[in-house]
Image (cartoon, rainbow, N blue to C red):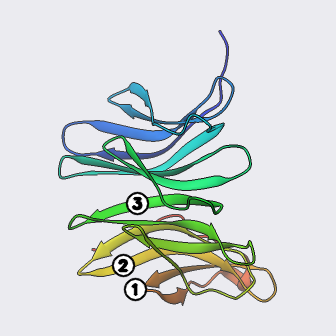
Amino acid sequence: MAEYPLRAAAISFDGTSVRVVGFHAASDEKACVWTDGVLADLPVPVSATKSKAYSIQAVGGHVYIAGYHTNGSLKTSCIWVDGTRTDLSAGTDGSAAAVFNSSGTNYSVGFLKDADSIPSASLWTGASQEFLPAVSGKLSGASGVTVFDGSSYVSGFYGNASDVAVPCYWVDGTKKDLPTNAGLAGFTTAIAVR
């Protein structure tokens, strides 16, 4: 029996079905969703050589998935809504790490390379992208998103002046650092607000 790499990255339960997203591969990784254990690949362009899915939200009868696809040279951030793909970063390297739908608007986060080709934490509200504040010229990324009482909350990290990763979150674009032991590097992976 051949062994293939696979990864389950996130899970969602809507009261009826259990859905898990990630990727599987026989040769190149393919973004996929398992619905009650049944595997389905997520659609990507014919030119895609690899794709991955990182997060899922199933709510209101719809399924929202975040990830990326690549043609081998350019990584394109994207979301899938009920299996239909929308590219968020066509023409610029990026990846979506999480998606959250609130009142019919999709909020997606991840990274997008800035004008200096540095991966930078990004928030997409619908199709509109904005870079989240961080240290100019340093790597940053966003990992999770939620919306509560009309405000967006995004988890992530940024590199400080000493190139140490600082865990943080942004509320409506305002960055708030999280402490680490003795100033060591840290990362956040998800966020929830109640």
Callouts 1 and 3 close, C-beta under 8 Å: no
Query: Which amino acid lies under the numbered mark 3 shown in the image of this protein?
Result: Val
Could you say where residue 179 lies in the image, as x and y percent from the top left? 60, 85
**Dot 3, how many residues are within 10 Å of its Cα: few (below 14), some (14-19), or many (20+)?**
many
The residue carrying mark 3 is 99
Q: Secondary structure at mark 3?
A: strand
**Dot 2, how many residues are within 10 Å of its Cα: few (below 14), some (14-19), or many (20+)?**
some
Query: Which amino acid lies under the numbered mark 2 shown in the image of this protein?
Result: Ser
- Residue found at the far right of this picture: 162
Mark 2 and mark 3 lie on one chain; the one further toward the N terminus is 3
Callouts 2 and 1 close, C-beta under 8 Å: yes
Residue that appears at 67% across and 43% down: 71
Which mark, residue 152? 2
Query: Which amino acid lies under the numbered mark 1 shown in the image of this protein?
Result: Asp
The residue carrying mark 1 is 172
Could you say where residue 30 lies in the image, as x and y percent from the top left? 57, 34
Residue that appears at 49% across and 60% down: 88
Which quadrant would residue 91 be assigned to in this image? bottom right
Query: 12 above or below 103?
Result: above
Residue that appears at 54% across and 82% down: 132
Q: Secondary structure at mark 2?
A: strand
Q: CA distance from mark 2 to mark 3?
A: 12 Å
- Determine if residue 192 is in view: no
Q: Quadrant of the C terminus?
A: bottom left
Q: Is residue 150 left or right of residue 64?
A: left
**Dot 1, how many residues are within 10 Å of its Cα: few (below 14), some (14-19), or many (20+)?**
few
Which mark, residue 28? none
Which quadrant would residue 15 be assigned to in this image? top left
Residue that appears at 79% across and 80% down: 163
Could you say where residue 42 lies in the image, as x and y percent from the top left? 45, 36
Could you say where residue 70 lies in the image, as x and y percent from the top left? 64, 46
Q: Secondary structure at mark 1?
A: loop
